[in-house]
Image (tube, grey):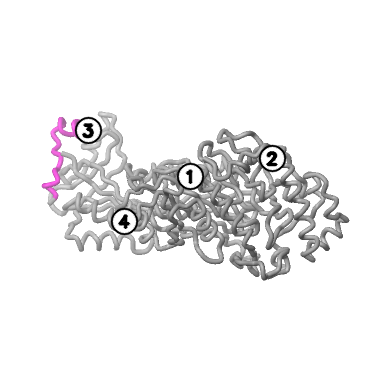
């Protein structure tokens, strides 16, 4: 089921032609309107008219999150503020927030890409979708909202948090779809149990989850606990918000990039060299149709790879693999690079554990120490033998060692002792930072 | 024939045993035997109580991780060599003890609580050796 078959199944050559002409227009637009880009282009001695093929994109400068912060709030905007109808901003936990704007056209494109995402997940105008992404400056809530309205489904704009009410609405409103962060979907499982509600018995049949990396095992936990199909949706506010790419549930292997709007590349984060399809690196997007704040080669800090193989769903849109992790979230433990999702995979591959965990990193002397706290489920406790519980801890430690390559201490903790996420989960507590 | 035991998983955190005992007390559940096994990270509280079903549901609804299992409880003479005599029977029958706890209750006998790797075989072996297994009623 496609929302926009003309673009979603466009032959590859036609897509390349469309992308090139859009890229050429974009280069002109930013060169003429954004001082930052004019300076960058000039430094690299490249002019918009030098873009003759898609490969020429490699001659263009990168844009980073710091560039957006340096040009706070509006200096990266290409369009006049008179044409801007919406402003979103990311949380400014590490300095000034990054500010993005949307013209009416941008808002429409965003709704369009979200409509494709909801349609691919199997949802239609007949559905009632509970939108538990946070509303506000965060792009998740409103991004999903416009997409749901676009396909003509009913949106329940409940926003994040207040789990008890979420469960009540899911039940009473007969919701057939839900969207939120994957960690919140896991939290709701727990909240439903408390309310004595079996989510599998509710009519919810499809969910779109995104805004943070999640493992294949977490997907299984959510699908089994909710009795639904869980699909991944990817995006970031700098590019547009959610809807940059989306999964088709037939394959559940990779996310189709809305590449008629967002041109993807994968680069080596250290050398900035473009990597061939299939190789893992940092995702980079160029917003080839955006008006308010179009970005050239924006470095997302998300680690993934491009999959150019044809998809069984019939879409010709190129795929990116599920995001492996963010370079921001990457921990360096005694010299080994570790993503929290790698530890999540090991934990959830084991039965008897709940999908709630936390990774505590500290330093003892000169050595990094890692402690993984994970909640036990009742079925791990059918045997009350201490030895078996300890064996389980040791088994998990061995498994982390062999799969992730680090020595971690695993500690089983009581249910409900790990903080429940209502938005993006905080999986890692890094106590080392205090000493830096 | 076997006696039901409640096990609770608790982290080594301040006040957890108090919370368990308070909860059971408030619900009119009397403790008959208690054993706390601990490691550096967590502990397991094992209880024999006046009403195991109620204890289980009260603890569960209050968010504890609870398990139910069966143990064998026997009464032996409180004399030197009493335990050895009993364990000999267990040894001969190649049964392993997962854990045990005991209390000598001031009278002439001592009470032993066993978790064996094979509860049925242990019960049979002890029975045929003429050792009486205590029933839940005996503890009330």
Assign a secondary structure to mark 1. Answer: helix
Q: Which mark is residue B120?
A: 3
Stretch in magenta: B120-139
Tell me the residue that label 1 is attached to.
A219
Mark nearer the N terminus (4 vs 1): 4
Against B21, is B37 above or below? above
Answer yes or no: is residue B89 visible.
Answer: no
Label 2 and label 4: CA atoms lie apart by 45 Å
Label 4 and label 1: CA atoms lie apart by 23 Å
Mark 4 and mark 3 residues within 8 Å of each other at the beta carbon: no
Q: Is residue B106 left or right of residue A6?
A: left
Q: Is residue A423 left or right of residue A47?
A: left
The picture places residue A106, in percent across and down from the top left corner, at 63, 59
Mark 2 and mark 3 residues within 8 Å of each other at the beta carbon: no
Label 4 and label 3: CA atoms lie apart by 39 Å
Q: Chain of mark 4?
A: A
């Amino acid at each position: 089921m496609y929302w926009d078959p003309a673009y979603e199944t466009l032959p590859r050559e036609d897509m390349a032609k469309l992308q090139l002409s859009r890229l050429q227009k974009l280069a002109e637009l930013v060169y003429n309107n954004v001082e930052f880009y004019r300076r960058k282009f000039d430094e690299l001695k490249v002019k918009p008219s030098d873009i003759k093929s898609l490969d020429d994109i490699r001659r263009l400068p990168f844009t980073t999150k710091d560039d957006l912060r340096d040009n706070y709030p509006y200096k990266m905007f290409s369009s006049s503020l008179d044409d801007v109808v919406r402003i979103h901003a990311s949380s400014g936990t590490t300095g000034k927030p990054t500010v993005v704007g949307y013209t009416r056209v941008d808002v429409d494109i965003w709704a369009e890409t979200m409509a494709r995402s909801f349609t691919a997940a199997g949802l239609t105008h007949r559905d009632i979708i509970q939108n538990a992404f946070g509303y506000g400056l965060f792009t998740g809530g409103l991004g999903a909202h416009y997409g749901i309205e676009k396909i003509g489904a009913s949106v329940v704009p409940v926003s994040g948090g207040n789990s008890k009410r979420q469960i009540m609405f899911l039940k009473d409103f007969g919701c057939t779809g839900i969207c939120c962060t994957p960690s919140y979907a896991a939290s709701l499982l727990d909240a439903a149990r408390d309310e004595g509600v079996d989510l599998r018995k509710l009519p919810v049949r499809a969910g779109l989850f995104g805004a943070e990396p999640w493992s294949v095992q977490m997907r299984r936990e959510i699908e089994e606990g909710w009795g639904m199909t869980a699909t991944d949706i990817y995006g970031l506010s700098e590019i547009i918000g959610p809807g940059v790419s989306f999964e088709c549930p037939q394959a559940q292997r990779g996310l189709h990039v809305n590449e008629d709007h967002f041109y993807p590349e994968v680069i080596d984060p250290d050398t900035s060299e473009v990597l061939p399809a299939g190789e893992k690196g940092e995702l980079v997007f160029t917003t080839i149709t955006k008006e308010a704040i179009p970005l050239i080669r924006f470095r997302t800090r998300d680690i993934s790879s491009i999959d150019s193989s044809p998809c069984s769903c019939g879409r010709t849109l190129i795929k990116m693999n599920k995001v492996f992790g963010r370079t921001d979230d990457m921990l360096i433990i005694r010299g080994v690079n570790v993503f929290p999702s790698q530890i999540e995979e090991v934990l959830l591959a084991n039965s008897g554990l709940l999908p709630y965990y936390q990774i505590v990193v500290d330093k003892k002397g000169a050595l990094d120490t890692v402690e993984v706290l994970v909640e036990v489920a009742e079925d791990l406790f059918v045997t009350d033998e201490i030895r078996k519980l300890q064996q389980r801890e040791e088994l998990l430690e061995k498994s982390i060692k062999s799969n992730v390559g680090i020595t971690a201490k695993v500690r089983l903790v009581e249910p409900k002792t790990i903080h429940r996420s209502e938005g993006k989960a905080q999986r890692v507590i890094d106590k080392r930072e205090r000493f830096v | 024939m076997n006696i039901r035991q409640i096990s609770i998983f608790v982290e080594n955190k301040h006040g957890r045993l108090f919370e368990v005992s308070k909860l059971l007390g408030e619900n009119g559940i009397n403790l008959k035997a208690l054993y706390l096994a601990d490691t550096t990270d967590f502990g397991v509280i094992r209880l024999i109580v006046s009403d195991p079903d109620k204890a289980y549901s009260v603890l569960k609804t209050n968010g504890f991780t609870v398990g139910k299992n069966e143990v064998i409880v026997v009464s032996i003479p409180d004399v030197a060599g009493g335990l050895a005599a009993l364990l000999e029977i267990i040894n001969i029958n190649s049964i392993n003890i997962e854990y045990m706890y005991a209390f000598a209750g001031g009278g002439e006998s001592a009470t032993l609580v066993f978790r064996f790797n094979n509860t049925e075989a242990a019960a049979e072996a002890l029975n045929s050796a003429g050792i009486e297994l205590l029933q839940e009623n005996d503890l009330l």
